[in-house]
Image (cartoon, helix red, strand yellow):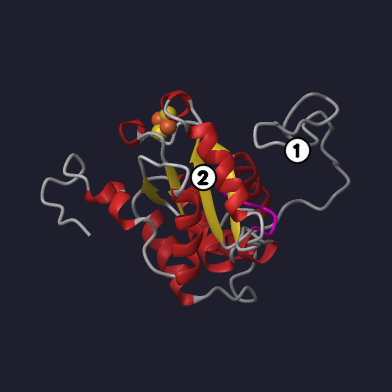
C-alpha cells in the first residue's frame, strides 16, 4: 500500500461496521470501577488537569487520550480503560473518539512518529520527494513510523514534517537521514530547522 491509499471497507467507508445494527443483546456499557482500575498517578493528574479546562468533561477526551497514548505507546485497551475510569465515561465512547482521529492509534505503533505534510503548499515545494526519502530512510527502523499528512498548519516552513510533535522545515531530501540519526541519538531533531526557533513564532526565541 502506498502512503496515499485510503483504506476502505466493503461498504465504501473508512469506518468499520458503521452499517451494522447495534447488538441489543449485549450487556450495557459500563464505566470502569475506580476501585478496581489502576491508573498511574501522573496520568490521572494530567487527565484531571485537562478536564478542568472545559465546562463539559467530555471535551477533554482528545488531550486525555493523547496523554494515555504517550504513556502506553498507543491507545491500548488498558489505556482506554484508565482514561474512561478517570473521566467517568464508557470505554466505547473513548474508542469512538480514538478511532476517528488520525493521531490517536488503537493498534500498537512505532515509538517515533514522523508525519510528512504532503498537502498543497508542501507538495509544490517538494514534499512528495521528501516523503519518499523519509520512507526509504526509515525502512529499516521499526521504531520510526512515517505517514503522509494533510496540511499540518505550518505552510510557511514548507515542505515540513512533524517529528514526535516537533515541527521542522523547510526540508530537503538529505534531512530524512538526519532525522533518523537524531531520533536514534535521542536528542533534538533537526534543531536548526525547528519551527519553535523562528522569530515569526516567538520574537524572543533564542536559536539553537
Ligand atoms: S501544506 Fe504543508 S503545512 Fe500546510
Q: Residue 53 in the image: x percent, y percent? A: 34, 51
Q: Residue 144 in the image: x percent, y percent? A: 58, 58
The image quadrant that residue 190 belongs to is bottom left
Q: Residue at x 30, y 32 (%)?
A: 156
| Residue placed most toward the observer, 117 or 79 | 117
Q: Which residue lies most toward the front here? A: 174
The stretch drawn in magenta includes residue 4: no
Q: Residue at x 70, y 31 (%)?
A: 5
| Residue placed most toward the observer, 177 or 50 | 177
Q: Which residue is mark 2?
A: 115
* Labels 1 and 2: the sequence-earlier one: 1
Q: Residue 195 in the image: x percent, y percent? A: 29, 46
The stretch drawn in magenta includes residue 105: yes
The image quadrant that residue 75 belongs to is bottom right
Q: Residue 83 in the image: x percent, y percent? A: 56, 61
| Left or right of 32 on screen, residue 149 | left
Classify mark 2: residues with Cα within 10 Å, few (<14), some (14-19) or many (20+).
Answer: many
| Mark 1 element type | loop
| Left or right of 192 on screen, residue 98 | right
Quadrant for the N terminus, please. top right
| Left or right of 44 on screen, residue 5 | right
Instruction: Note whether residue 102 is visible.
Output: no
Q: Is mark 2 within 8 Å of ligand 1?
A: no
Q: Which residues make up the magenta segment?
A: 103-109
Placement of 102 over or under 155, stated as above or below: below
Q: How far apart are the two marked residues, 1 and 2, measured between alpha carbons?
A: 17 Å
Q: Quadrant of ligand 1?
A: top left
The disc placed on residue 1 is 1
| Mark 2 element type | strand
| Residue placed most toward the observer, 45 or 133 | 133
Image marks 1 and 2: residues in contact by CB distance under 8 Å: no
Amino acid at each position: 500500500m502506498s502512503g496515499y491509499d485510503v483504506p476502505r471497507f466493503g461498504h465504501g467507508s473508512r469506518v468499520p461496521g458503521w452499517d451494522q445494527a447495534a447488538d441489543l443483546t449485549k450487556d450495557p456499557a459500563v464505566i470502569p470501577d475506580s476501585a478496581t482500575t489502576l491508573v498511574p498517578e501522573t496520568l490521572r493528574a494530567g487527565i484531571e488537569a485537562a478536564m478542568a479546562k472545559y465546562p463539559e468533561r467530555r471535551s477533554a477526551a482528545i488531550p486525555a487520550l493523547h496523554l494515555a497514548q504517550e504513556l502506553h505507546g498507543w491507545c491500548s485497551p488498558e489505556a482506554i480503560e484508565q482514561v474512561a475510569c478517570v473521566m467517568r465515561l464508557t470505554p466505547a465512547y473513548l474508542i469512538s473518539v480514538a478511532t476517528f482521529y488520525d493521531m490517536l492509534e488503537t493498534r500498537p505503533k512505532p515509538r517515533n512518529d514522523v508525519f510528512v505534510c504532503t498537502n498543497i503548499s508542501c507538495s509544490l515545494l517538494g514534499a512528495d520527494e521528501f516523503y519518499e526519502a523519509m520512507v526509504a530512510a526509515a525502512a529499516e527502523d521499526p521504531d520510526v513510523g512515517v505517514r503522509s499528512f494533510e496540511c499540518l498548519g505550518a505552510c510557511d516552513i514548507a515542505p515540513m514534517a512533524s517529528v514526535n510533535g516537533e515541527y521542522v522545515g523547510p526540508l530537503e531530501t538529505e534531512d530524512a537521514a538526519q532525522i533518523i540519526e537524531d531520533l536514534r541519538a535521542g536528542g533534538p531533531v533537526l534543531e536548526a530547522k525547528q519551527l519553535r526557533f523562528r522569530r515569526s513564532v516567538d520574537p524572543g526565541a533564542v536559536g539553537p
